[in-house]
Amino acid sequence: MRPIRQHALSALTASLLAAFSLPANSVIGLMQVPPTAQIPPVPNVIVTLDDSGSMAAEVPFDPTLTYDVPPNVNGTAFRVPPALPLAYSNAYSNANTVDLSITGTGGVANAYRTAYLALTTTAQRQNYANWYGFYRTRNMAMKASVMSAFSPAIIPDGRFRLAWQGLLVSCDRGFNRNAATNCATANAIAPYEGTHRTNFYNWVQGVPASSTTPLRAAYRRVGEYLRTTGVNGPWADRPGTSEAPILSCRRSYHIMFTDGQWNDGDNAAFGNQDNTNFTFPDGVAYTQNRPYRGPTVGGNLTLSDVAMTYWGTDLQTGTGYDNNVAPVIKRSGTELYGTTPVAQYWNPKNNPATWQHLVTYAVGFGEAAQLTPASVGRPANVVPTFSGTTTGGASFAELVSGPREWPTAADFSLRQFDLWHAAVNSRGDMFPATDQRALNAAFQRIVAEILAQNTATGGAAASLAVVRADFTVVRTGFESDPNFRGVMKGFPLVG
């Protein structure tokens, strides 16, 4: 850890800026230690975006949503919309326009024209034009959400170290310090600022929609990358320049977005890790504990096995890599899941790992967001119900206490539940996004939580608060009389 002796204003400001963009009922963290305390090293964050062909599917226009133009790398609007009735054909790939009021040459398909002309006000039609040019497909919707969540207003310079990859088409050959096959620029871990921030934005804008969905292979690349050392490795103090000093308490996160079920070959996975007894690096025995273990049938070689591998084994064991990562404890003591008491260490809300490990935040869109019996056409006793939070609800409690099991991954149509299971096994979070509002919220909540967990040792995520739906602005700060404490206050804007 590196002690700081000046007021941690930048850390507090970053948390506040993240809070400004959170939706109702979002969760953020508060500092519970004085601003003179130590702060963890800047975390490693690796982003995986789905570049499969299904990402070309259309996302229906929702007139109840406001489709804002996403920010560019400098925080200004990515592209100013053309004058109505023109709209961009795809604002991320070109500046070509179409006329929403006509069909045929220079216009749009009749369905788009009819929908546009049915709107009666200029504001409504502009909103439709923004949807058409910036949000019309899953691929475009993903880009808008990522560009918004990773904007400088939410992630100031110096708060993340970032790397990125696609699944099979875009930056899918590992993490490189220079341009490489299928990757126009360096995509390895580096401070998220300057040219590296620009390269990330340029990459996001160009992610295609033209491959399959090898999620396990992509996950494996992230985990194996975190096993590497040296000046070009993700643990180097200044990647590409100097390795020392190694900061072994640095946290690592994987943000994985997909719109479907994984379909890569079995050679991309790791046996049946969550159905195998083994010992964690801190000496605690894992004995196929619930809710982490996989189903007895179809639970082998799954995404959740890959997640358990890279969370439950020490990714760095060499000299200088002490196991001193600070645990993230959101629920202290024993908590009841249904009628079953779960000890703090085994509570899936908590991350007790002190060794170098990988935590995954999963974002499911399209088919990957279908996590209820009704959405997959299965009985309630066959699949669990996602109740709104990763570890909430009665059916999740049954995954903890029994007799419920995770659905079999042998059934392709149920593999989105394996994405949820992988998030649980890595002590991360799952965010199924069924519309653009939820997709925006998912990325922004993930960014806000990572920022909060890496603000100050001992409490950045240990005390979490719910942002009320009627709060428009969230203010975080400190009160020192009579005792120091972190505070958060919400209040409506006056306008």
Image: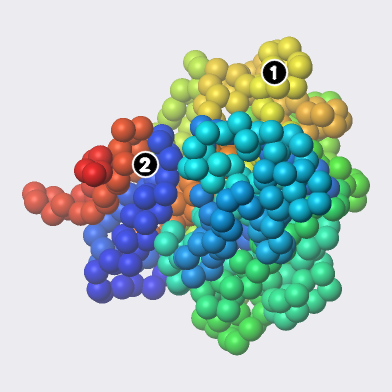
Q: Tell me: 406 left or right of 43.
A: right
Residue 102 numbered mark, or none = none
Q: Which residue occupies 28% across, 66% down?
A: 9
Q: Which residue occupies 83% across, 60% down?
A: 169
Q: Who is closer to the viewer here, 213 or 89?
A: 89
Near mark 1 (Cα within 10 A), the count class, few <14, some 14-19 or many ≥20, is some
Q: Position of residue 137 (x, y in %)?
A: 71, 45
User: Mark 2 or 1, which is nearer the eye?
Assistant: 1
Disc 1: which residue? 373
Q: Tell me: 291 left or right of 367.
A: left
Of marks 2 and 1, which one's residue comes earlier in the chain?
1
Q: How many marks?
A: 2
The answer, for residue 365, to whether it is visible in the render is yes
In the rendered image, the quadrant that contains the N terminus is bottom left
The amino acid on which the numbered mark 2 sits, given as a three-letter code, is Leu
Classify 378 as above or below 244: above
Near mark 2 (Cα within 10 A), the count class, few <14, some 14-19 or many ≥20, is some
Disc 2: which residue? 464
Q: Which residue occupies 32% across, 61% down?
A: 13
Q: Secondary structure at mark 2?
A: strand
Q: Who is closer to the viewer here, 15 or 42?
A: 15
Q: Position of residue 360 (x, y in %)?
A: 61, 49
The amino acid on which the numbered mark 1 sits, given as a three-letter code, is Pro
